[in-house]
RNA sequence: CCCCCCAUCGUCUAGAGGCCUAGGACAUCGGCUUUUCAAGCCGGCGACACGGGUUCGAAUCCCGUUGGGGGGACCA
């Protein structure tokens, strides 16, 4: 047995008994239906880590065999997200490789050749049932309380009959003749899983549009792309016997399988993109009931031209396109839960945090360590330490990881992360700032949890004075309460600040502290009225840092403006 | 309804028959700190789903029950 350059014990561990290989190969094979979601990212990450750990190759393949579900340029988005996480593939789209092409839609002739062979060998056969005929058979089976299995014909239709059926407008598919034995999946995570022959039926290999089904394409491609290890979600476990049957029919080796536990929402439901829609829909319906929004304004905000689309969405018949959903969410002032990796990027999570956190969903190092860089994961990772139990996606813990990571990051990383955050968001007051200013912002915004916090805390420092709007509650609480005490303090502190010649946090801080002391006031009694004068809100970076950043002229100007505004208030 | 998988604090997990009066992290609660939002610091509460075996001994092995999840497509 040739184990290539791999340590013998590792090769044994990995079960390389029937595989000829130059190195081990894992693959991530998403279908292009949108952005990369958390579950997919975890699968991709584990594939990447296993390849790195065993010195193999990680490959990316786009499974675009469903012409109805494919979404324009979704493969680009998928690749963007993967790269953002740092999961660069060794073989796949754009990078190329010996298994090219890596879009299944470009490999139709390969599948076709194998279909010819299976048909000729009597291992597969044509079938002409319409979907309504199949539905009827399934319903009948259900009525009689038996499992539906496709009834294999006594004799297989000939090529000529298939031609005739096609000419007559019948759908023509190709089905695999399943063997009469069951299969044992030797899963590296779950152990041996036995599925009896009675559970398996003659499934479709080639659809009536000529495209292969998932099962068919995946088996052929894994063989030809020399994939040795298949890690995928547990939702595929029951598909594995089908794939093994196909491997048997085609004379292929069986790769090493590992079925990953599923990632669930905190409520125990499967984490899916629909989650986002549900939250936005609930907020929308509440707004409609409250008279705050109606159909026509929703259409305008979402940028939809078709009222029927909105109606269908409200009935739960369809999903709204991502951009429309986000616009609606923004206008409704709800934070739709992040589901796709891109959502986390837009909210201001760090990719290294996501990678770290996601790695812990179903894997652990075995000790108490849980902070890892991608590089550390590459060496610490192993198949044996993947768990069997489904994991819930705990946003609170992720948020904590992000908070500590931002706090621990060096200045360059903080700047690049903030820059990335700004670039994937709509342009705002911070968008055009230079690196030096971004670094300064990260410095004065201690304790931010997501990068969006930097924006919410300090955007007001970068707008024109006229754009400052004073928050009504804040004004009442900190300016007007106790017979306009806050405004009086503001006027007095303005006087004290006006005397300052040097305008830095180092000079401002003692001046304000002295002032507060002299007036027998807590710092808060001074800082809050001032903060509202500067930003219109009760939330901002440290008051001293805010004053310094704004500069003498702008700070005093804003306070004067605030005092004028305050005078007019009752 | 059928098939399959799973089962330790609220959550992610450590635990490979004695090291377990079950460890860590997040959350939570209490306190400290405090110019806002945060962050930080200290401390507390908190789990082996249930029932049978096996064994001198079980969170760990076996069986059953219950619960959760996945699958049952010309979707992947």
Image (cartoon, coloured by chain):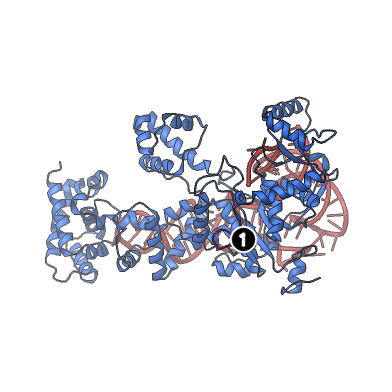
Image colour for chain A is blue
Instruction: Residue under label 1, please give it.
Output: A59
Q: Quadrant of residue A174?
A: top right
Position of A204 with respect to A391 (left or right) is right
Q: Where's residue A562, x and y in %?
A: 16, 51
Position of A116 with respect to A89 (left or right) is right
Image colour for chain B is red
Position of A101 with respect to A498 (left or right) is right
Q: Where's residue A164, x and y in %?
A: 73, 31
Q: Quadrant of residue A438?
A: bottom left
* Image position of A40 with respect to A56: above or below: above
Q: Where's residue B30, x and y in %?
A: 45, 54
Q: Where's residue A481, x and y in %?
A: 21, 46
Query: Nearest the camera: A480 or A460?
Result: A460
Query: Nearest the camera: A22 or A53?
Result: A22
Q: Quadrant of the N terminus of chain A?
A: bottom right
Q: Is residue A498 magenta?
A: no
Q: Residue at x 39, y 70 (%)?
A: A412
Q: How many marks?
A: 1
Q: Which residues are magenta?
A: A91-103
Neighbor class of circle 1 (other Cα within 10 Å; few <14, some 14-19, many 20+) is: many
Query: Nearest the camera: A63 or A312?
Result: A63
Q: Residue at x 16, y 56 (%)?
A: A559
Q: Quadrant of the C terminus of chain A?
A: top left
Query: Nearest the camera: A239 or A203?
Result: A203
Mark yes or no: residue A447 visible.
Answer: no
Which SS class for mark 1?
A: strand
**What secondary structure characterizes most of the magenta part?**
loop
Mark yes or no: residue A134 visible.
Answer: yes
* Image position of A173 with respect to A546: above or below: above
Q: Is residue A102 magenta?
A: yes
Kindly identify which chain the residue marked by label 1 belongs to.
Answer: A
């Amino acid at each position: 047995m040739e184990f290539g350059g791999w340590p013998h014990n590792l090769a044994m561990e990995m079960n390389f008994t029937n595989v000829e290989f130059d190195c081990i190969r894992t693959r991530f094979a998403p279908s292009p239906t949108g952005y990369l979601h958390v579950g997919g990212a975890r699968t991709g990450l584990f594939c990447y880590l296993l390849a790195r750990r065993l010195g193999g190759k990680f490959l990316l393949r786009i499974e675009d065999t469903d012409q109805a579900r494919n979404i324009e340029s979704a493969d680009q988005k998928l690749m963007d997200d993967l790269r953002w996480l740092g999961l660069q593939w060794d073989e796949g789209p754009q990078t190329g490789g010996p298994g090219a092409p890596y879009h299944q839609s470009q490999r139709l002739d390969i599948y076709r050749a194998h279909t010819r062979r299976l048909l000729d060998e009597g291992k597969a056969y044509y079938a002409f049932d319409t979907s309504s005929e199949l539905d009827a058979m399934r319903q009948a089976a259900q009525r009689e309380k038996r499992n539906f299995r496709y009834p294999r014909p006594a004799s297989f239709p000939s090529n000529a009959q298939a031609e005739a059926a096609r000419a007559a407008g019948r759908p023509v598919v190709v089905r695999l003749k399943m063997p009469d034995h069951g299969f044992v999946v030797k899963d590296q995570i779950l152990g041996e899983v036995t599925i009896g022959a009675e559970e398996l039926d003659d499934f479709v290999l080639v659809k009536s549009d000529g495209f292969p089904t998932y099962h068919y394409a995946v088996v052929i491609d894994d063989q030809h792309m020399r994939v040795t290890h298949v890690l995928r979600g547990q939702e595929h476990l029951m598909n594995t016997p089908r794939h093994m049957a196909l491997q048997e029919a085609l004379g292929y080796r069986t790769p090493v399988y590992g079925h990953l536990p599923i990632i669930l929402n905190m409520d125990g439901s499967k984490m899916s993109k629909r989650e986002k829609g549900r939250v936005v829909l609930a907020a929308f319906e509440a707004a409609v009931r409250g008279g705050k929004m109606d159909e026509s304004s929703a259409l305008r905000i979402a940028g939809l031209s078709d009222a029927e689309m909105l109606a269908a969405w409200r009935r739960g018949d369809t999903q709204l396109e991502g951009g429309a959903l986000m616009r609606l969410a923004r206008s409704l002032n709800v934070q739709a839960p992040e589901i796709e990796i891109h959502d986390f990027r837009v909210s201001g999570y760090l990719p290294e945090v996501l990678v770290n956190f996601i790695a812990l969903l179903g894997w652990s190092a075995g000790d108490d360590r849980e902070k890892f860089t991608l590089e550390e994961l590459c060496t610490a990772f192993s198949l044996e330490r993947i768990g069997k139990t489904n994991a819930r996606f705990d946003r609170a813990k992720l948020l904590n990881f992000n908070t500590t990571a931002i706090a621990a990051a060096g200045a360059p990383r903080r700047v690049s992360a903030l820059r990335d955050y700004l670039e994937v968001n709509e342009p705002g007051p911070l968008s055009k700032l230079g690196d030096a200013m971004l670094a300064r912002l990260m410095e004065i915004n201690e304790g931010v949890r997501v990068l969006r916090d930097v924006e919410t805390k300090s955007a007001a420092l970068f707008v024109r004075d006229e754009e400052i709007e004073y928050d009504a509650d804040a004004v009442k609480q900190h300016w007007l309460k106790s017979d306009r005490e806050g405004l009086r303090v503001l006027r007095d502190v303005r006087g004290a600040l006006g005397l300052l010649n040097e305008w830095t946090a180092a000079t401002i801080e003692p001046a304000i502290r002295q002032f507060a002391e002299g007036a027998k006031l807590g710092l808060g009694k001074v800082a809050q009225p001032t903060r509202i004068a500067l930003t219109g809100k009760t939330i901002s970076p440290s008051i001293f840092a805010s004053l310094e950043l704004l500069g003498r002229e702008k700070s005093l100007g804003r306070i004067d403006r605030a005092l004028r505004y305050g005078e007019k208030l009752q």
